[in-house]
Image: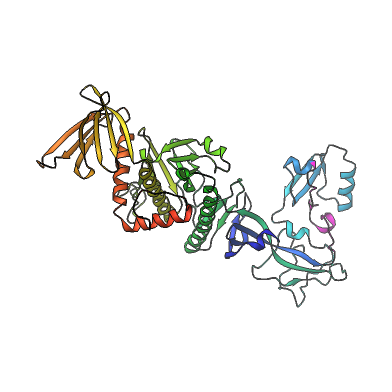
Amino acid sequence: MDFRTACEETKTGICLLQDGNQEPFKVRLHLAKDILMIQEQDVICVSGEPFYSGGGAEHNIPVVVSKISKEQRAELSGLLFIGDAILQINGINVRKCRHEEVVQVLRNAGEEVNLTVSFLKRAPAFLKLPLNEDCACAPSDQSSGTSSPLCDSGLHLNYHPNNTDTLSCSSWPTSPGLRWEKRWCDLRLIPLLHSRFSQYLPGTDLSRQNAFQVIAVDGVCSGIIQCLSAEDCIDWLQAIATNISNLTKHNIKKINRNFPVNQQIVYMGWCEAREQDPLQDRVYSPTFLALRGSCLYKFLAPPVTTWDWTRAEKTFSVYEIMCKILKAPVCDVPLGKIFTQDSDLLDRRKHCFTVQSESGEDLYFSVELESDLAQWERAFQTATFLEVERIQCKTYACVLESHLMGLTIDFSTGFICFDAATKAVLWRYKFSQLKGSSDDGKSKIKFLFQNPDTKQIEAKELEFSNLFAVLHCIHSFFAAKVACLDPLFLGNQASASAATSSATTSKAKYTT
């Protein structure tokens, strides 16, 4: 069975495609659950043996390359393509030569052949049509009414998206059973698993107008797909994003079978990272993020093997980092003011978030859709909750009045400060007793706790060598505490836990 026949179609439509330096041309998009098919309209012989010709002076068109042998030097060079018009052969001008003369020059060219070529726009369709210099181009009653592409100067096909009628011409060479039809033929196939899409010009915050491109995990690009309207563009993006998300979730479920409970994957997906020292022509670069077990992984490409997980560009302890969803402008305002009024954004990209690492480094990320941003936020909350709930407590070394101490953040009991040498507890407070805190941005944190007996505020100042890691850890523990009081969050966690692993053992009392 053909792979595509097993793909359930979810959306289809007509768009324009900008491919390289060519002018935009009509294509049909077929979106299936695991593949995006881009099709162009072509004329094919549906019965009989077609007559091939490469052109020549006798047809008033150049001799055109109609076939390139696989794995031969012409194909391996990457410099010759179907549709290239041959202008010179080893310096000999063949523009006005007849087809037979060009063939003879090629035969006598020797082993080394230097070709000067020119690409004819949209050539593939007419290369498959029969040639006849006396063609009157009179369409038959069964035709669409459009002239033969060869008779229409041979440079393009005047096609209509919904027309699949048989093309015929009374003066074409006759052959028993010879019949030609316009059909949509595959131009490019983009597997959706781990693919990414973007509305933005590569590396910038400049959005294309009603256009986007899809890039497969192996780097194959769809080209620029131009939609008919903004609404149509959003519909396509949302449909593609949904299919990619569904494939990713299914893939995560399969991968998690090979990982222990404390190493389960919660999230995988593409985003764009803003460079901290951007080059003039590139501010953003594609980045693949994954939340697995205790870590946030930052990759240049999706991890496929177990070994790939050891080669992440960066890793962060999920409970020692802080994520912030950036607030976008409430409404559009004149360009130049849009990012200074009620907005946390740094540029024209709309759906962004930051991650502050345990060292205090701020990482800035952008995703394409609001739904992508919401999916990331939910996943980060889930990963943080699961990890805090798993480790239960975390202890950091600190200094109090020149004495080495330890501060334990315990999910059940709260804050415990003890002498590192004797292990004697100096003080302890519940999470509910913390009424405020401040830090100097370098090493010191001042905690304000309320004494349960006197109701007085007691200040406790500690000095840490890893200030941001401690601050983020405290924030993560508080977030997990709050999550325990949210029935909706806990209900979603219970469902996700049951779906991903039946072997998960949880200490939180939210499962049934």
What residue sits 85% from the left and 57% below the top?
Answer: 58
Q: Main secondary structure of the magenta part?
A: loop
Q: Residue at x 17, y 39 (%)?
A: 449
Residue at the far top: name it: 402
Residue range corresponding to the magenta coloring = 49-72
Q: Decide which of 331, 512 is in the foreground and name it.
A: 512
The percent position of residue 367, horizontal first and vertical second, equals: 45, 49
Above or below residue 457? Residue 188 is below
User: Is 68 situated left or right of 13 in this image?
Assistant: right
- Protein image colouring: rainbow
Q: Which quadrant of the figure has residue 41?
A: bottom right
Residue 258 lies left or right of residue 506; in this view the side is right
Q: Residue at x 85, y 50 (%)?
A: 97
171 and 413: which is toward the camera: 413
Look at the image and tell me whether residue 9 can be seen: yes
| Side (left or right) of 223 relative to 183 | left
Closer to us: 498 or 337: 498
Of residues 376 and 507, the one drawn nearer to the viewer in this rendering: 507
- Residue 68 lies within the magenta run: yes
Q: Is residue 157 above or below residue 116?
A: below
Residue 468 visible in rendering:
no
Q: How many marks?
A: 0
Relative to 40, 508 lies left or right = left
Q: Residue at x 57, y 60 (%)?
A: 33
Q: Residue furthest bottom?
A: 141
Dividing the picture into quarters, in which one does residue 149 lie?
bottom right
Image position, residue 408 (x, y; %): 28, 35
User: x and y percent of residue 50 in the render?
Assistant: 83, 63
Q: Quadrant of the N terminus?
A: bottom right
Spot occupied by residue 345 in the image (x, y as percentages of width and height):
36, 46
